[in-house]
Image (cartoon, rainbow, N blue to C red):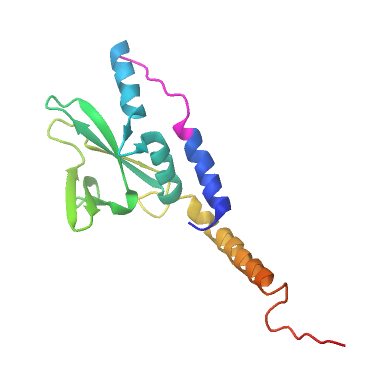
């Protein structure tokens, strides 16, 4: 959060994804246009594609809640914060539901409704150690970012101390 280089790199990628061209194929033209409008719609002051790209970079997971009308047609898409989502599994280890925690409130979404439609889409990056959660790629850079942050603090301390390292002996001749 405090590293300007990491912030800028993530911002460049997410803005590029959010501004990329989007098209739909298959089905009727009106359905294609409706789908593109649904994905491009800003919900909760968030651009969906940009937010999903951010979540995949930082957490390795991105979740989309599909809000449907009475007929089951999607009417809005919401990006859910990955740090609040948990995957619930059955006895065989298959995902059966997702829980979303916001403060003391927990909402549970079945992985599919009675008609086979999903209420949550889970996108994840590859994680060789976990079947249900992705691995964020920014975590791999955390060591380098920490070194950069420490060097920045050290350089600032030098400048604040008139470029004299702490503990240095100064001898006037």
Residue 117 falls left or right of residue 39: left
Task: Quadrant for the C terminus, please.
Answer: bottom right
Image quarter of residue 50: top left
Q: Residue furthest top?
A: 29
Residue 142, given in percent of the width and then of the height, sits at 52, 59
Q: Is residue 158 above or below residue 68?
A: below
Residue 108, given in percent of the width and then of the height, sits at 17, 47
The answer to whether any part of residue 149 appears in the image is: yes
Q: Residue furthest right?
A: 173
Instruction: Assess whether residue 26 is covered by the magenta stretch.
Output: yes
Residue 148 falls left or right of residue 63: right
Q: Is residue 121 above or below residue 61?
A: above
Magenta: predominant secondary structure element?
A: loop
Determine the residue positioned at 71% across, 73% down: 162
Residue 168 falls left or right of residue 4: right
Magenta region, residue range: 17-27
Image quarter of residue 110: top left
Determine the residue positioned at 51% across, 39% down: 13
Determine the residue positioned at 73% across, 76% down: 164
Residue nearest the observer in this picture, 86 or 166: 166
Q: Is residue 86 above or below residue 171?
A: above
Determine the residue positioned at 49% across, 49% down: 137
Instruction: Assess whether residue 49 is covered by the magenta stretch.
Output: no
Residue 3, given in percent of the width and then of the height, sits at 54, 56
Residue nearest the observer in this picture, 80 or 168: 168
């Amino acid at each position: 959060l405090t590293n300007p280089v990491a912030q800028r790199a993530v911002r460049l990628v997410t803005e590029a994804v959010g501004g990329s061209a989007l098209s739909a194929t298959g089905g009727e033209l009106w359905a294609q246009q409706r789908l593109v409008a649904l994905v491009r719609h800003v919900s909760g002051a968030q651009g969906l594609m940009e937010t999903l790209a951010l979540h995949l970079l930082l957490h390795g997971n991105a979740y989309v809640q599909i809000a449907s009308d009475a007929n089951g047609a999607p009417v809005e898409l919401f990006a859910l914060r990955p740090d609040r989502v948990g995957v619930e599994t059955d006895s065989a280890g298959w995902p059966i539901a997702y829980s979303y925690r916001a403060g003391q409130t927990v909402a549970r979404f079945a992985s599919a409704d009675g008609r086979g439609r999903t209420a949550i889409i889970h996108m994840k990056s590859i994680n060789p150690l976990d079947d249900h959660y992705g691995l964020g790629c920014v975590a791999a850079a955390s060591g380098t970012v920490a070194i950069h942050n420490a060097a920045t603090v050290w350089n600032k301390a030098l400048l604040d101390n008139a470029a004299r390292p702490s503990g240095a002996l100064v001898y006037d001749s």
